[in-house]
Image (cartoon, rainbow, N blue to C red):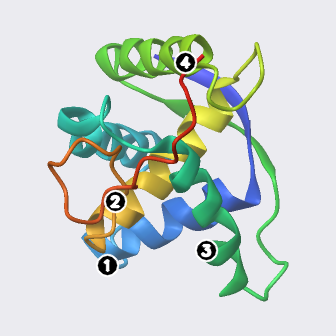
Amino acid sequence: MRKQLALSRTVMLGMREYRTLLYGEAPVQNGFIVGLAYNNLQPDLGDIDWVRVNLYEREFLAKYGDVGTQRVKTTINIRADVSAGLETLRAALVEENIFGTARIYLPFVIKLLILGALLQAKGALPLKADGRHPGAAQPSGRAKE
């Protein structure tokens, strides 16, 4: 399934790093990288602390001083099951309202997936406080709305 998207600098750098981490310099398509990130995170999608994953963006970008990689308008090929999973995740993020907005777009979901996959590869994927993961966030004491 072809998707026309505007992908941020974070996503482009993240896909490059994830591709290099897994495949070295092999020429792997961006759609495959998105699908791989989704499939690797799929067992934990409901348990991931997406706010903390999003906060990792600053730390991730801090190591890239170059401005050679910018936002890109592109078309990527994604398998239909991955596309459906991305839409399901997007709807779940909107429903949970953890980012304080009524709209979440597909490029943002892809950014979260790529950052989450990088954190997972480092063994630092933040999970919600459910006792399953020693690095999980501690309850903040805030009541859920």
Q: Is residue 27 visible?
A: no
Question: Which of the marked residues, 3 or 4, is nearer the chain's N terminus?
Answer: 3
Q: Which residue is mark 1?
A: 24
Question: Residue 42, labelled with which disc?
Answer: none
Q: Nearer the viewer, residue 41 or 35?
A: 41
Find disc 3 in the rendering and name its residue: 60
Q: Amino acid at mark 1?
A: Gly
**Camera-nearest label, 4 or 1:** 4
SS at circle 1? loop
Q: How would you rate the neighbour count of disc 4 (Cα within 10 Å): few for under 14, some for 14-19, many for 20 or more?
A: few
Callout 2 crowding tier (Cα within 10 Å): few <14, some 14–19, many ≥20: many
Relative to 44, say whether 82 is above or below. above
Between the C-alphas of marks 4 and 1, the distance is 37 Å
In the rendered structure, find residue 96 and report the number of the disc placed on it.
4
102 versus 9 height, above or below:
above
Determine the secondary structure under disc 4: helix
| Residue 63 rendering spot, x and y as whole percentages | 65, 87
- Viewer-nearest of labels 3 and 4? 4
Instruction: Point out residue 119 in the picture as x, y percentages from the top left corner.
Output: 38, 65
Q: Mark number for residue 125? A: 2
Mark 3 burial class by Cα count in 10 Å: few <14, some 14-19, many 20+: some
Looking at marks 4 and 2 on the same chain, the residue that comes earlier in the sequence is marked by 4
How far from the left and from the top, in percent, is residue 5? 71, 31
| Chain-order first, disc 4 or disc 1 | 1
Which three-letter amino acid code belongs to the residue tagged 2? Leu
Which amino acid lies under the numbered mark 4 shown in the image of this protein? Glu
Quadrant into which the N terminus falls: top left
Mark pair 2, 1: CA separation: 22 Å
Q: CA distance from mark 3 to mark 1?
A: 19 Å
Horizontal placement of 108 versus 103: left or right? left
Depth check: give the residue in front, 72 or 87: 87
